[in-house]
Image (cartoon, rainbow, N blue to C red):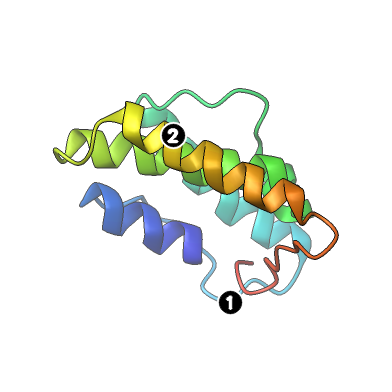
Amino acid sequence: MIQYHLLETLSGKPVGKGLVAKPKNKMQSIGNLNLCFSFIASEKIRLENIGPEDIWDGTEVCVMGLIWTLILRYQISHGGASSDSGTFIFEQQREDACASSSTFALDLSCCV
């Protein structure tokens, strides 16, 4: 649900129909994520090696890559900061997170 609302908020467009409001199992959650990924593809946003199962599994690199791609796409399309300065900030945050990787955790239980 969070990805669905995030995409609608960032893009200002409806994502589509067919969302299961309260998914009860993995298949329904993956179905919701597929709906989001279909919308991302329709927006001509290119994702490499990231799929709904990666998000469901909580693969940190894939989740961060997806979020970063969305931020770049919509920040640039709405006249935000240049991608160069954004890349520097992201790289610095990534280095900080990697330096303390033993304490870094990403809880996505609220996302599905």
Q: Is residue 34 visible?
A: no
Q: Which of 39 and 28 is in front in this view?
A: 39
In the rendered image, which quarter is residue 84 located in? top left
In primary-sequence order, the first of circles 1 and 2 is 1
Q: Which residue is drawn at 56% across and 56% down?
A: 32
Where does the C terminus fall, quadrant-wise? Answer: bottom right
The residue nearer to you, when weighing 55 against 24, is: 55
* Relative height, residue 110 to residue 18 (above, below): below
Is 49 situated above or below 106?
above
Q: In this view, does 59 lie to the left or right of 46?
A: right
Q: Name the residue under label 2.
A: 88
The nearer-to-camera label among 1 and 2 is 2
Secondary structure beneath label 1: loop
Provide residue 19's location: percent of width, then percent of height.
49, 61
Helix or strand or loop: what does disc 2 sit on?
A: helix
Q: Residue at point 60% right, 23% down?
A: 48
Callout 2: 10 Å neighbours few (<14), some, many (20+)?
Answer: few
Could you tell me the amino acid type at mark 2? Phe
**In the image, which disc is placed on residue 22?**
1
Q: In the figure, is residue 38 to the left or right of 13?
A: right
